[in-house]
Image (cartoon, rainbow, N blue to C red):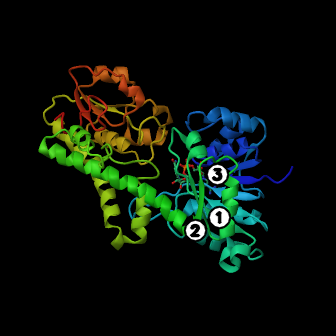
Amino acid sequence: MTQPALCVVGLGYIGLPTATMFAQAGMEVVGVDIDPRVRSTIAAGRTHIVEPGLSPIVQEVVAQGRLRVSERPVPADAYIIAVPTPHHHDTKEPDLRAVEAATASIAPVLARGSLVILESTSPVGTTRRIGEQLARSRPDLTFPAQAGDVAEVQLAYCPERIIPGRMLHELVHNDRIVGGLTPTAAQRAASLYRAFVRGEIITTSAETAEMVKLTENSFRDVNIAFANELSMLCHDLGLDVWEVIRLANRHPRVQILNPGPGVGGHCIAVDPWFIVAANPTRSRLIRTAREVNLEKTRFVIDVVQQRLRRTEQPRILCLGLTFKPDVDDFRESPALEIACALTRMYPGSVRCCDPYAAALPVQARDAADLHLTDSGTGLQWANIVVVLVGHTAFRSLALPSHVDVIDTVGLFRHRDIASSR
Ligand SMILES: NC(=O)c1ccc[n+]([C@@H]2O[C@H](COP(=O)([O-])OP(=O)(O)OC[C@H]3O[C@@H](n4cnc5c(N)ncnc54)[C@H](O)[C@@H]3O)[C@@H](O)[C@H]2O)c1
């Protein structure tokens, strides 16, 4: 068998669609994952994540033998690392153990001419550091730190900015920033992605590309924090935040985002901390935005508690558990955090409903003792409904007139916690 063109390490929400697009473009791709369940699912031509349109393409490229799975990296022309980069919840420091482990796993199979691309969202300087890690493991090869543009192994950072739910479209059509440790690395990585990317590919340095990715997510976090802060201010003023935002957005240069129960997911709730951890004194706005968005989650719990003081025999239905609408992803989900907190506070009085509940890790459900139900049964049972996620499937729900609604996402009649108290 010939050497595959590409080895993708980490086959999650980013790695699997990326590997699949390269394979669909005609390349021989080997996907690597440490999770045997992930490997066996993909090897059978199926997917372990919900993403519209992905399953049939995975099935096709696996059947054609263009996408194969392996327990460990195999020799390839290029390597893409797409493993998780969480943060330590207590210290807020980045946790780069998966990137370091993935880097260690490709070191033995590198050869003259290899290109290594980091796609995981990472603190500025990570691509350079993994280059140094590889150089220590493979003194028989030259790396950019010693040989620059003529190094035998080249490294680039190529961040991913796709949104779950529209990944296949955005993978192809988004502009891409490709940062090389050397100009050669940037050019080689750019021409690799041209296999399927139709958006513009813009080359820069690895450090700039790393900062661009963190900047994008921090921009979103700061802007959502503004909306969330407004929602808490309006609550205290007895005003409807949805109306305030709707009217303020009539200004031609104002575009306020929607408030919610906080900010979740693997990206926006995490990546700003990478900037803060690296330079705490210069990142006051970014840190404060993170703190406001975390505070909003506690604020929603407080509002529910206040409401319960005047409710006899509360029966609370939490609508939505994922970190945002229409995805099966529960990572850092404020909705899940609120549902778990309420379940602990009011044992036996809380039920939860989410169209993606089947994907909720069993440990998360059992640890919090969550009581899952379907929306019809839940709405019949409840006297308080806390709307936490604006899933499309919830839009058509008819809320019984007797229920008290705490709508944190403005799904029903654009009623926020401010207007419905
Ligand atoms: N999910 C998104 O929407 C999104 C968007 C942009 C960027 N990112 C970034 O992409 C990176 C990956 O995120 P994701 O959402 O795909 O994560 P994920 O958890 O869905 O997938 C990561 C996969 O990597 C595997 N893995 C972990 N360590 C490994 C190792 N040493 N070797 C091989 N496989 C390993 C895991 O088993 C898992 O299947 C993160 O840095 C994330 O911040 C994610």
Q: Residue at x 78, y 75 (%)?
A: 140
Q: Distance between the residues labelled 2 and 1?
A: 8 Å
Q: Is mark 3 on a helix, strand or loop?
A: loop
Q: Which of marks 1 and 3 is nearer the N terminus?
A: 3
Q: Is residue 67 above or below residue 194?
A: above
The answer to whether marks 1 and 3 mark residues whose Cβ atoms lie closer than 8 Å is no
Q: Does the residue labelled 3 lie within 8 Å of ligand 1?
A: yes
Image-based side of 131 in relation to 266, left or right: right
Image-based side of 418 in relation to 155, left or right: left
Three-letter residue code for mark 2: Ser
Q: Name the residue under label 3.
A: 34
Three-letter residue code for mark 1: Ala
Q: Pick the quarter of the image with the C terminus.
A: top left
Q: Mark 2 points at which residue?
A: 205
Residue 186: mark: 1
Percent coordinates x, y for residue 152 in the rendering: 75, 71
Image-based side of 75 in relation to 17, left or right: right
Q: Out of 380 and 181, give the one closest to the viewer.
A: 181
The answer to whether marks 2 and 1 mark residues whose Cβ atoms lie closer than 8 Å is yes
Image-based side of 239 in relation to 22, left or right: left
Three-letter residue code for mark 3: Ile
Q: What element carries label 2?
A: strand
Residue 222: mark: none
Q: Can residue 337 be seen in this view?
A: yes
**Image quadrant where residue 148 sits:** bottom right
Q: Out of 232 and 245, give the one closest to the viewer.
A: 245
